[in-house]
Amino acid sequence: MDLHLADKTVIVTGAGSNIGRDIAHSFASEKANVVIAEWDEPQGKKVAKEIMDRGGKALFVQTDVANNEQVTLMAQKAIAEFGTIDILINNVGWGVDQLFMQETREKWKKMVDINFWGVINCTRAVLDQMIEQKSGSVVTIGSDAGRMGEYYEAVYSGCKGGVIALTKALAREVGKMGIRLNVVCPGATVPESKDAVGEKSLWNEMFDVFTPEIQVKAAKAYPLRKLGKPQDIANAVLFIASERAGHITGQTLSVSGGYTMM
């Protein structure tokens, strides 16, 4: 299926590692212009180079999504380089599992800043351009934790639930301007290898936890009896971001092997 993504300009936040990396490569394979909005400079530049070495078009912009000034500048650079912003993928996320009563306020603030304010900042930064051109698609990577509430993930679940509600409200607000907003919720999604993540990625701390034995055990909680791969998420994101899904907005799609069904 031709997704009609050629020459579209897409911003992917957190495109240096794991899910974001596969999303960026997948858009590039469809001949889209890809903006790598990543705070890990070496990893962001690495992914941009990977895309360009394969004949694609990519621009790396070092971006902390919790910093609104950086986000605004990133959007301006995307427009200066490619002339437009057609698609935004709010991929960045952060959280470390821990009981609510054992977490610090500093950790709560960091989760809210990245997982919720980051989505607000990036979405606001692209809407003026999308409203002007009367078209645009925003896909936010949520989490099944935001749909059901997950043990050890109270504040993280709250942030992800918040972006689902935010997406629905904005879809109602800007739909008449030709702009669609949707959420894709992964379950546990394990990188293919250590090469697929940067040194600053949380996964560097989690590889020792998600051993092959633990992955087999965890997969039993999923009806399909397997954990997700980054490409599983990327496939869904590309479709729902494209005009092939042009009559879909304000929706939340779980891509989690059936972990939640709602």
Image (cartoon, rainbow, N blue to C red):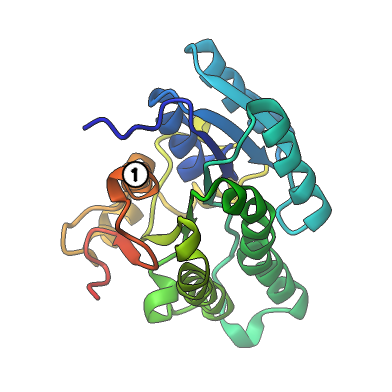
| Circle 1 residue | 243
Q: Nearer the viewer, residue 262 or 73?
A: 73
Q: Three-letter amino acid code at disc 1?
A: Glu
Identify the image quadrant of the C terminus: bottom left
Which residue is rendered at x = 48% and y = 42% of the image? 18
Against 151, residue 16 (above or below) is above
Q: Is residue 141 left or right of residue 80?
A: left
Q: Position of residue 33 (x, y in %)?
A: 53, 27
Which residue is rendered at x = 34% and y = 50% of the image? 240
Q: Nearer the viewer, residue 21 or 240?
A: 240
Against 187, residue 98 (above or below) is below
The image quadrant that residue 192 belongs to is top left
Q: Residues within 10 Å of mark 1 (few under 14, many from 20)?
A: some
Q: Position of residue 85 (x, y in %)?
A: 59, 40
Which residue is rendered at x = 70% and y = 54% of the image? 65
The image quadrant that residue 80 belongs to is top right
Q: Residue furthest bottom?
A: 101
Q: Residue furthest right?
A: 69
Q: Position of residue 7 (x, y in %)?
A: 48, 26
